[in-house]
Amino acid sequence: MTDTVLDKLKILAESAKYDVSCSSSGTVRHNTAGGIGNTVGGVGICHSFTADGRCVSLLKIMLTNHCIFDCAYCINRRSNDRPRATLSVRELVDLTIEFYRRNYIEGLFLSSGIIRNPDYTMERMVRVVKDLRTTHRFNGYIHLKSIPGCSRELVEEGGLYADRMSVNLELPTEESLRRVAPDKNFESVFAPMRYIRQGMLQSQEDRRKFRHAPRFVPAGQSTQIIVGATPETDHDILRVSSALYRRPSMRRVYYSGYVPVNTYDTRLPAAVGRVPLIRENRLYQADWLMRFYGFSADEIVDSTTPNLDLEIDPKLAWALRHPECFPVDINRADYALIVRVPGIGVKSARMIVASRRYGSLTSDSLRRIGVVMKKAQYFITCRELSLGGTIQEVTPEQVRRALVPTPSRSKKLDPRQLSIVWE
């Protein structure tokens, strides 16, 4: 690796760190004779941990941080005076292969600023992934960012070599996007999303007819929404996410707490404290409820409560707003209702339904299953739990006070001692 390429690597890796939409592959790509690398199904990417404790990573880099756009929230915007660099296709391919052979990475996450025009940039990115797959026979994970406004032909070609593709939505409403990113519009973002979805559906149909038909973006697509940069509520954000999840190709929506990298721009908040990071965490929890727990966006937040409660998780907040749904009889209720009980997860709910066929469950049984009784005790009944301690006998406000640590408790802590994080 030459000093010039190393300098470019430092600049472009730093420029790529603000894109969070890369965590897992969800695909299988086996090694072949004469090839290098493989992609294991279900493993995490970008310094994520697998179920067996392994940490795997990928080279997260931009082709270039030059950009003709002037988006207010972006560190690489045209008007910023910062070091710029561009890797050639050959340099980026060699860099990826060299890092893989040194066991630094297991895949590639490739994004880019826009130089000249979207098609010119996307064509160079496609050449990188095509060269990796065909010339070097690289079978590791590849996540390719699609450039907003690029042509359908380039998206379709890139999808034949990438495991996952993504297009960042960035902001939940077109009005906000037009205000802080005047060079973009929803059509330029949704068009590549539509091309990816259509390519995936066509690929699935082809593979039903022809066993060895090429796969198109087998791990699906993802997107990213910036949180806290514009005045949209959590209700607005989650409704957009819910609509995206209804599309068969969308696998993940990522939420990125706004980081004020361009403090001089008056269109954005000047400074952000702790709230956006907590809000980002709550949005991920709400996203999980929509994907795995059967909640709709309008159940989690609505017009009367448009923002998520920052003190408690969204599932507990929903339960406190709907005491009429509780207590739930663990030995009789169906799975859909059990999984909505705070302190009971998907795995625990399935174990409860399976276990009660062999006898009535007790509170001790629930603890062994993995139920968090500290929360669940207020919302369930079982063989020896009576109504005396449930939410029907104590008010939602009392339950909230019992589960949320009071400020006085934290004030009494000795600052010289480590504190325990209350869940």
Image (cartoon, grey):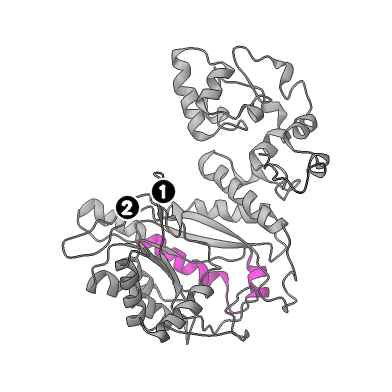
- Image location (x, y in percent) of residue 305: 74, 46
Q: Which residues are magenta?
A: 173-199
Nearest to N terminus: mark 2 or mark 1: 2
- Residue 323 visible in rendering: yes
- Image location (x, y in percent) of residue 360: 52, 13
In the image, residue 153 lies in the stretch drawn in magenta: no
Q: Which residue appears at 73% of the width and 63% of the height?
A: 231
Amino acid type, mark 1: Thr
Mark 2 nearby-residue class (10 Å; few <14, some 14–19, many ≥20): some
In the image, residue 198 lies in the stretch drawn in magenta: yes
Amino acid type, mark 2: Val
Which quadrant: the C terminus? top right
Q: Which residue appears at 74% of the width and 69% of the height?
A: 269
- Image location (x, y in percent) of residue 343: 60, 32
Which of the 4 image quadrants contains residue 69? Answer: bottom right
Q: Which residue appears at 43% of the width and 55% of the height?
A: 24
* Secondary-structure class at tag 1: loop
Mark 1 nearby-residue class (10 Å; few <14, some 14–19, many ≥20): some
Closer to us: 216 or 363: 363
- Image location (x, y in percent) of residue 409: 80, 39
Which of the 4 image quadrants contains residue 398? Answer: top right
Marks 2, 1: nearer the viewer: 1
Residue 40, labelled with which disc? 2
Residue 50, labelled with which disc? 1
The majority secondary structure of the magenta stretch comes to helix
* Secondary-structure class at tag 2: loop
Which quadrant: the N terminus? bottom left
